[in-house]
Each structure stands twice: as C-alpha cells, then as structure tokens.
Amino acid sequence: MNWNREKLMEATRRQMPASRWEHTLRVMETAVELARRTGADPEKAEIAAILHDYAKFWPEEKLQEGILRYRLPRELLQYSPVLWHAPVGAEAVREGLGIDDEEVLEAIRSHTTGRPGMSLLEKVIFLADYIEPGRSFSGVEEVRRLAREDLNRAILKALDNTILYLIGRGFKVYPQTLLTRNDMLDQIPQTHPKEESH
Ligand code: DGI
Ligand code: FE
Ligand code: FE
C-alpha cells in the first residue's frame, strides 16, 4: 500500500489538541521501534500509530452516532465512552482517509481493549500506546521492562493494571478486555499450576 504519510499525519493532527498529537508522535516512535525488534511491519506500525487516536477527541454524540452508523457492537453503548474512539476511529479513517488495510484497521480498532487472537501488529500498537515515554501511570516501568522481553507478558501486565484500576474505581470492565487478558494467559507458557482447585 502506498501511504501518504504526511497527509495522514496532517489529517490526524487536525482532529486533536496539541498534547494528544504529541502523544501520537511518541506512540509512532515507540511502535516503529517495537515493530523492528519483534518482526512486525514497521511501516504498518507507523501508520496505525498515527491513526490510532483519530477519534479520541470527537464529542460523545458523534462517537455514538458512529457506533450506530458503522453498525459497531451496540453493547459498547453500555460501557465507558473512552472505549468508543478505537472502533469508531477505525471506521472513520477507512471512510474518510481511504485506509483499506485490514491489519492496520484492526490495530486501531483493538488498541484500547485488545482482543483475543491479536496479531503481532495489534500487540505492538496496544503496547506502544501503553508504554510511550510520556506515560507515567503506576506500573508502567514494569510493563516497559517486560516489553523488552516478551510482548505477551507485557500486555498481560498492562491489562492487569487497567482491570485492577477499573475495579478499584468501581467502574465496569468491558468483557473484551477480560477476554484479551485470558487469551494472554493462554499464550504464555505457565511455570506454575494455572489455578488452585478448591
Ligand atoms: O486513548 P489513550 O488514552 O491513548 O489510551 P487508550 O485508548 O488505551 O484508553 C485508555 C483508557 O481506556 C484508560 O482510561 C482505561 C480505559 N479502559 C481500557 N479498558 C477498559 C477501559 N475502560 C473501561 N471502562 N473498560 C475497559 O474495559
Ligand atoms: Fe486510544
Ligand atoms: Fe493513544
């Protein structure tokens, strides 16, 4: 695919405040580096990173409309609006910017919750978003360290952190987030008995 990288960057930059654009640039660098190291396609990683938060600053009503118009899972409406920008953003860049690479679109779509059976590119974008150098939430250092050794372990830790954070605040957890975590556990060779039997 022949991407017009500069045009995509400009189109994305216009959707968001400067601080979010700076986050996007850091995700871009982090994603390209992770891709090079793990054998994912660095060009696709760069494009997916540029576009991953395309709809992040769209008003809630516009995101809600997007869920209906693009026939995205309606159950999203029962969960936090922070989840909506990922699937709506994927459809918006398909429609508005002519992005038709399904691997790139999937990486944008799954970047907040992950999904069971994530591709290497999806894992790279999910993690780059979590560990980019501007992130300072608690536990991020450990995820950065794990990401140098094993993407699956790093993603598991990131999801553990997110799920525990959501539970601690009394928020709902989107089922796909839990399913992604379970899938990571299945993908990691276990050195301990998986579960205690009672
Ligand atoms: O868009 P970014 O801020 O760069 O990052 P993101 O798309 O990963 O969004 C992070 C937010 O998403 C963070 O506040 C936690 C939230 N989140 C992730 N999984 C879930 C979730 N929120 C809910 N309610 N449920 C989830 O399963
Ligand atoms: Fe996001
Ligand atoms: Fe992001």
Image (cartoon, rainbow, N blue to C red):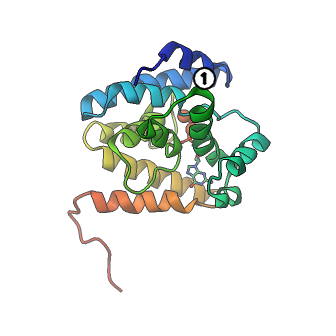
Residue 117: quadrant of the picture: bottom left
Kind of residue at badge 1? Thr
Q: Is residue 171 visible?
A: no
Residue 61: quadrant of the picture: top right
- Residue at the image point whose x is 65% and y is 61% from the top: 75
> In the figure, 21 relative to 121: above or below?
above
Q: Position of residue 108 (x, y in %)?
A: 51, 39
Q: Quadrant of the N terminus?
A: top left
Q: Position of residue 131 (x, y in %)?
A: 43, 34
Which secondary structure lies at badge 1?
A: helix
Q: Position of residue 72 (x, y in %)?
A: 62, 52
- Image position of 67 (left or right of 193): right
- Image position of 36 (left or right of 137): left
State the residue in front, 136 or 78. Answer: 78
- Image position of 179 (left or right of 13): left
Q: Position of residue 6 (x, y in %)?
A: 51, 13
Circle 1 residues within 10 Å: few <14, some 14–19, many ≥20 = many
Q: How many marks?
A: 1
Q: Is mark 1 within 8 Å of ligand 3?
A: no
Q: Quadrant of the C terminus?
A: bottom left
State the residue in front, 183 or 133. Answer: 183
Point out the residue furthest to the bottom here.
198
Q: Which residue is mark 1?
A: 12
Residue 33: quadrant of the picture: top left
Q: Is residue 164 visible?
A: yes
- Residue at the image point whose x is 70% and y is 44% from the top: 66
Point out the residue furthest to the right here.
61
- Residue at the image point whose x is 59% and y is 40% from the top: 91
- Image position of 183 (left or right of 149): right
